[in-house]
Amino acid sequence: MGLNISGVSFSTPICKVNSAANTNKVAFKGELEKDTVELSKQESELTKKEKQEIAKSARTNAAGWSILGGVISTIYYATRSNKTIAEKYDLDIEKDKAFIKQIKNDQTLWTIPGALGFGILGWVAAACIGKENIDVV
């Protein structure tokens, strides 16, 4: 018993084009528009609602990591650079300088319960605070 493999059994039909000169039936006859690319950095100012969402996300994230990291999380969030925070939350380093500083302070503050051994309580508190109750710069 053997396998019969021949080139004929794997051949595929070939479509032949006789003429491509007739282009009257082409659906698009105009010029193509140039593609535009939108960069990730935001050109316009963030709204208060967007800042509140970012601040709540930052607080909750930091408090969550403090459950596992304790004092190490507090040190990490306190020593992060503005550039790191700006890249993480897609902010402009110069225009959003005050907001970046607020995020850094909030994240450091919300890791303190984890450093004291009450990490889960800090995370629950950070997650339960509504974003409407967060004051942003």
Image (cartoon, helix red, strand yellow):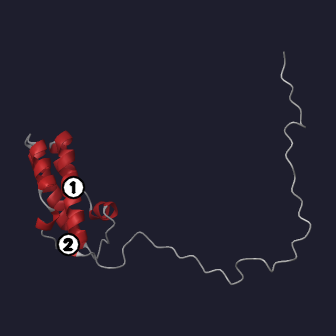
Numbered badge on residue 98: 2
In the rendered image, residue 19, in percent from the top left (x then y), is placed at: 90, 70
Is residue 50 placed above or below 65 in the rendered structure?
A: below
Q: Earlier in the sequence, mark 2 or mark 1?
A: 1
In the rendered image, residue 32, in percent from the top left (x then y), is placed at: 65, 80
Apparent side of residue 44 relative to residue 9 in the rendered image (left or right): left
| Residue 135 picture quarter | bottom left
Q: Quadrant of the N terminus?
A: top right
Numbered badge on residue 56: none
In the rendered image, residue 48, in percent from the top left (x then y), is placed at: 21, 74
Look at the numbered disc 1 and give the secondary structure of its residue.
helix
Front position among marks 2 and 1: 2
| Residue 104 picture quarter | bottom left
Is residue 97 placed above or below 79 in the rendered structure?
A: below
Look at the numbered disc 2 and give the secondary structure of its residue.
helix
Residue under label 1, please give it: 79
The residue type indicated by label 2 comes to Ala
Apparent side of residue 117 relative to residue 100 in the rendered image (left or right): left
Residue depicted at 60% across the width and 79% down the height: 34
Label 2 crowd bin: few (<14), some (14–19), many (20+), radius 10 Å: few
Q: Quadrant of the C terminus?
A: bottom left
In the rendered image, residue 50, in percent from the top left (x then y), is placed at: 25, 70
Is residue 2 placed above or below 124 in the rendered structure?
A: above
Residue depicted at 32% across the width and 72% down the height: 92
Whether pointer 2 and pointer 1 mark residues with C-beta atoms closer than 8 Å, the reply is no
The residue type indicated by label 1 comes to Thr
Give the Cα separation between the discs numbered 2 and 1. Answer: 16 Å
| Residue 83 picture quarter | bottom left
State the residue lying farthest toward the top.
1
